[in-house]
Image (spheres, rainbow, N blue to C red):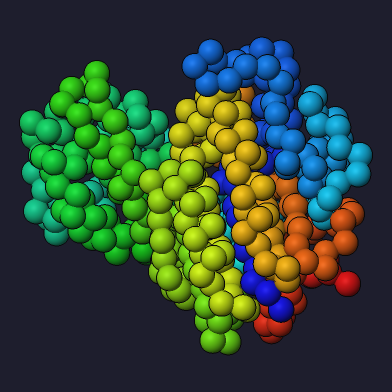
């Protein structure tokens, strides 16, 4: 039977979504545009990288073919004609283009309900929500109360926050309520407690996540967000792949943000690194320790949080190349009967307007013992990943999704 591991390259979309226009993203293509930018020199940065996008190990699994099948365009630098893995792309059917939507669908439970969002007004939050948050958390007030880039609003309001003790509250086009506070002057645990209050207050509004955004530094010139971010999600939809694995008595290991995304429900042993490299290290450790029949679910968030939202194409490219270089380690750590799926939850095109996620198809690459290389086509839901993993691990088939395994 072996083990199964799903690695989500957070935000690494491959364009082509038919409904992208509904989200204002018609034409977005994270991987395709990034490859083009690198080929044209717009993805160069002397301190990081230069030249065409180089992902030889991902391309050897079929990434270039998956990109072309999704978008209809051949990306520069991808030329593998005989891939070693199964390759295709997934079509997200969930409402929204945020992290929970994509991950929950990967786990077999697409989101059919409408998320709550905050309007493009100043103030953006309902007065009753703000008043309750201030009263229950005993705050002197809040700062921000608008749509904003996290790094920009911390630079703008961080010093006032430190003087006043008022946390910085903001949102984006996603279904989020974000709270930034200084780790030392406000306190990390106090920030987490504040987010727990906000989570409860946001539940009636169907807000997907409340996110703690701690930062350090003394002035706007040196403020920096830390790795102690924590997401407080609404409970996941029932009967997902994680729940099925736990109910079957299987070992589950959640690496990175997975525990937060699934509100710590059926997430087994949770381990989290400081960055992608740390989470790959933890995934390798999980592969060395997890029992036969176990399921390892990994999120690598740096593509999204550090580079996609910041529209940093060179940084995004370098991050992808760093992961690609570690793929041989993952392959070497797998046992003969193990099965691995590489995919994404949405796009975040670093060449696109704004600083938010983009609605796109996502690549699906699979390899492992007994897996015949070749195309798996356009998967009509990301839930096909859950169905395939369930078949591979001998778990009950989920209500949604179709396995691509024979």
- Could you say which quadrant of the image residue 372 lies in? bottom right
The answer to whether 259 is drawn above or below residue 251 in the figure is above
Q: In this orientation, does residue 243 appear?
A: no
**Rendering coords of residue 88 (x, y %):** 81, 51
The answer to whether 40 is drawn above or below residue 329 in the figure is above
Q: Nearer the viewer, residue 136 or 373?
A: 373
Quadrant location, the C terminus: bottom right
**Rendering coords of residue 352 (x, y %):** 61, 26
Residue at image location 11% in from the left, 48% down from the top: 139
Q: Is residue 201 left or right of residue 89?
A: left
Q: Is residue 3 left or right of residue 403?
A: left
Residue at image location 69% in from the left, 60% down from the top: 340
Residue at image location 38% in from the left, 46% down from the top: 274
| Total count of labels | 0
**Rendering coords of residue 404 (x, y %):** 83, 66
**Rendering coords of residue 306 (x, y %):** 46, 34
């Amino acid at each position: 039977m072996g083990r199964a591991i799903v690695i989500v390259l957070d935000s690494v979309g491959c364009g082509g979504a038919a409904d992208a226009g509904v989200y204002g993203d018609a034409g977005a293509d994270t991987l395709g545009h990034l490859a083009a930018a690198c080929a044209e020199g717009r993805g160069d940065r002397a301190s990081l990288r230069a030249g065409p996008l180089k992902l030889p190990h991902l391309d050897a699994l079929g990434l270039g073919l998956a990109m072309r099948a999704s978008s209809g365009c051949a990306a520069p630098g991808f030329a593998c004609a005989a891939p070693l893995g199964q390759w295709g792309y997934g079509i997200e059917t969930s409402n929204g283009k945020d992290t929970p939507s994509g991950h929950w669908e990967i786990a077999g439970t697409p989101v059919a309900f409408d998320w709550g969002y905050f309007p493009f007004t100043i103030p953006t939050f309902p007065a009753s929500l703000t008043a309750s948050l201030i009263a229950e958390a005993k705050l002197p007030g809040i700062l921000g109360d608008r749509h904003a880039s996290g790094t920009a609003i911390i630079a703008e309001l961080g010093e006032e926050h430190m003087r006043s003790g008022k946390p910085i509250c903001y949102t984006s086009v996603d279904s989020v309520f974000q709270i930034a506070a200084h780790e030392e002057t406000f306190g990390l645990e106090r920030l987490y407690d504040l987010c727990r209050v906000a989570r409860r207050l946001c539940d009636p509004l169907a807000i997907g996540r409340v996110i703690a955004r701690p930062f350090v530094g003394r002035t706007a010139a040196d403020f920096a967000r830390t790795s102690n971010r924590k997401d407080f999600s609404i409970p996941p939809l029932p009967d997902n792949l994680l729940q099925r694995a736990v109910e079957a008595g299987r070992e589950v290991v959640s690496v990175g943000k997975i525990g937060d995304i699934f509100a710590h429900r059926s997430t087994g042993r949770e381990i989290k690194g400081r960055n992608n490299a740390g989470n790959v290290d933890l995934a390798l450790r999980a592969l060395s320790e997890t029992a036969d029949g176990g399921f390892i679910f990994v999120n690598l968030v740096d593509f999204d949080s550090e580079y996609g939202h910041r529209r940093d194409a060179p940084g995004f490219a370098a991050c992808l190349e760093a992961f690609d270089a570690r793929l041989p380690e993952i392959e070497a750590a797998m046992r003969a009967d193990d099965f691995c799926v590489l995919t994404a939850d949405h796009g975040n095109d670093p060449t696109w307007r704004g600083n938010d996620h983009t609605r796109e198809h996502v690549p699906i690459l699979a390899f492992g013992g007994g897996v015949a290389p070749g195309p798996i086509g356009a998967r009509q839901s990301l839930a096909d990943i859950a169905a395939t993993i369930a078949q591979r691990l001998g778990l009950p088939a989920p209500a949604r999704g179709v396995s691509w395994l024979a």
